[in-house]
Image: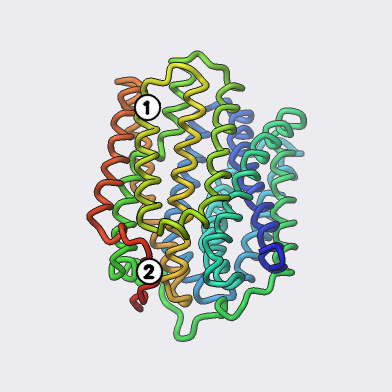
Amino acid sequence: MRRNRGFTIFLVAQTLSVAGDTFTMIAIPLLALKATGSVLQMGLLTGLSGTASIITGLFAGVVADRLNRRAVLITCDVARALLYALIPIVWLFGPQVWLLYVIVPIGACFAMTFQVTYVTVVPALVEPDRITEANGRLSASYSIAGVLGLALAGAVAGAFGPSVAIAVDAASFAASALGLCFVRPGTRSATAPGPAAAPLRGFLDGAGFLWRHPVLRSLTVLLSVFGFVMLGLTDVTIYHLKRDLGQTDAAVGTVLATSSVGTVAASALVARVRRRFGFGPCWIAAHALAGIAVVWLAVAGHVAPVVALLTAVTFATALAGICSMSLRQEVTPDHLLGRVTSAFWTIHSALGPIGAAVLTAAAGRYGAAAVYVAAGTACLLVAVAAVFTPVRQPRPERRLAETA
């Protein structure tokens, strides 16, 4: 992998892009809060971004499958660099909150398209038996960039203001685009033949492949349940740390940042673990571990056990997630990979916002402990249910994938 120049450049470019995403995650809400003093405005912008991502998922796969994928990635980075550069320039003449409502959803559209397309490029950069290792390295790099990006974004925003942090964000996307200019994916990344599909038809093509493939169908259903109960876990944990354990905002940030070491560890180990035990055992064991750790959070009365248990959760979810993404890349025909990826992400994440609202509302009414028990139990049920589906197969990648 170290001798693979194309993948190394791609890794650096992706890391810069992820760092830019983390700056956006911090700087945009801070800018909105500073300009309006309203938490509701922050929530509206977050909701608008999430809605734009889901809508984009309907056609992002078609874009990835029908156009030159490297060009799509570069275009997405350049577009985000230009969009986010507008904010600090306009802010020099005074706050213009309306501009955020224009740029945030457009930026989210380009971000979703980028995320779908990058998944389709990885198999064109590495050998088939290196896909899981490549995804592990990407995930580890993303985790480190996310932690450092969040810390740096907060520091820059605190010292110079959120608009300057957004300027750094724009620069990171420009640097990522420049790096991608030197990446030359193999022939697997070629434009798919045949007439261009309508966006909805393209989404249905991806969903149809998921439905026809026994393992991917089961994964989509199981992860829809998992996403419903897990998306709000961070919010519940923040509530638990603040209300039940009396921690400061700085301590909350430290806990969340420290627990992300689990993702880094999973990224380093996933290729060897999957090679030894197979896909099914890894995926099922990871979800069982996540469920057990979440249940035990209900009785964590100090910060140290919270950190340890959250680290176990991030380790488990990263291990399972990398295995899942790698399997899709291995069994999906290249000309469908973009549509399958966007359909998979859109379908299994659709219930997440609802679940987050339910979990946080329940935490306010019944307490974080009750929510942890319910969510952890649901995760364990997902692992148990997987035992009775084709997901349990150790080597599903060796079977011939069904074609659309």
Residue 382 vertical position relative to residue 138 in the rendered view, above or below: above
Q: Which mark is residue 206?
A: 2
Q: Quadrant of residue 89?
A: top right
Residue at 34% across / 32% down in the picture?
359
Viewer-proximal residue among 360 and 209: 209
Q: Amino acid at mark 1?
A: Trp
Furthest residue in direction bottom, as rendered = 194
Residue 119 in the image: state x and y as whole percent. Answer: 53, 63
- Determine the residue located farthest toward the top in the rendered image: 246
Q: Is 324 left, or right, of 88 in this rendering?
A: left
Image position, residue 257 (x, y; %): 59, 33
* Residue 31 or residue 218, whichever sits in front: 218
Image coordinates of residue 397 in percent, x first then y, are 40, 68
- Residue 99 appears in the rendering: no
Residue denoted by label 1: 296
Name the residue: 50% across, 47% down: 49
In this rendering, the answer to whether 373 lies above or below 136 is: above
Amino acid at the residue labelled 2 = Gly
Badge 1 marks a residue whose secondary structure is helix
Is residue 10 visible from the viewing direction of this image? yes
Mark 2 Cα-neighbour bin, 10 Å: few <14, some 14–19, many ≥20: many
Residue at disc 2, secondary structure: helix
Determine the residue positioned at 63% across, 74% down.
185
> CA separation, marks 1 and 2?
38 Å
- Location of the C terminus (image quadrant): bottom left
Q: Residue at x 47, y 60 (%)?
A: 275
Question: Looking at the image, is mark 1 or mark 2 earlier in the sequence?
Answer: 2
> Is 318 situated left or right of 349 in this image?
right
The image shows a total of numbered marks equal to 2
Residue furthest out toward the front: 276
Q: Nearer the viewer, residue 237 or 206?
A: 237
